[in-house]
Image: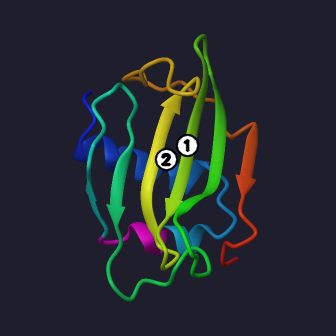
């Protein structure tokens, strides 16, 4: 399936339920009513996120945007699936990057990922 609104909705649900984010409720609030866009066409499933005004932030305000959380999953025969969440300067989610093998392979239509990530990295700036 090409990257677009339906894929973004799939990844939203996957991320909330399976990535092991330390404050799952806060993450769900970030996605609630958010607008998705800027769907990458390179073979990854990355997209931008515009969170509704007034939504409690994921992280403390930062001087710059960047990745605050990542989760890596083993995928059947092709290696690994990497998911990274980035924030903007206000601490709100602004991008989701979904890639396979450091973006060296396209994300397959059917994901047979391990039930839980084998590696998680979370910023100390997250609101937990």
Disc number for residue 127: none
The residue positioned farthest toward the bottom in the image shown: 54
Q: Which residue is mark 2?
A: 14
Q: Describe the element under mark 1 as helix, strand or loop.
A: strand
Q: Residue at x 49, y 47 (%)?
A: 14
Q: Quadrant of residue 68?
A: bottom right
The main secondary structure of the magenta stretch is: helix
Q: Are dots 1 and 2 in contact, CB under 8 Å?
A: yes
Residue 32 drawn in magenta: yes
Relative to residue 85, is residue 13 drawn left or right?
left
Quadrant housing the N terminus: top left
Vertical comparison of 69 with 101: above or below:
below
**Front-most of residues 86 and 118:** 86
Q: Nearer the viewer, mark 1 or mark 2?
A: 1
Q: Quadrant of residue 67?
A: bottom right
Vertical comparison of 32 with 70: above or below:
below
Name which of mark 1 and mark 2 comes first in the sequence.
Answer: 2
Q: Residues within 10 Å of mark 2 (few under 14, many from 20)?
A: few
Q: Residues within 10 Å of mark 1 (few under 14, many from 20)?
A: many
Disc number for residue 83: 1
Q: Position of residue 75 (x, y in %)?
A: 60, 22
The residue positioned farthest toward the front in the image shown: 63
Quadrant housing the C terminus: bottom right
Relative to residue 92, is residue 39 drawn left or right?
left
Q: Residue at x 51, y 19 (%)?
A: 104
Which range of residues does the magenta coloring cover? 28-33
Relative to residue 97, is residue 122 drawn left or right?
right
The residue positioned farthest toward the top in the image shown: 77
Q: Position of residue 70 (x, y in %)?
A: 64, 49
């Amino acid at each position: 399936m090409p990257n677009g609104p339906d894929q973004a909705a799939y990844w939203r649900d996957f991320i909330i339920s399976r990535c092991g984010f330390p404050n799952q409720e806060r993450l769900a609030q970030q996605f609630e009513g958010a607008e998705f866009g800027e769907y990458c066409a390179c073979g990854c499933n990355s997209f931008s996120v515009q969170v509704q005004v007034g939504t409690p932030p994921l992280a403390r305000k930062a001087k710059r945007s960047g990745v605050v959380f990542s989760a890596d999953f083993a995928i059947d025969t092709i290696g690994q699936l990497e998911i990274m969440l980035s924030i903007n300067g206000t601490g709100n989610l602004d991008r989701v990057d979904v890639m396979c093998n450091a973006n060296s392979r396209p994300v397959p239509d059917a994901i047979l990922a391990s039930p839980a990530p084998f590696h998680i990295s979370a910023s100390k700036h997250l609101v937990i």
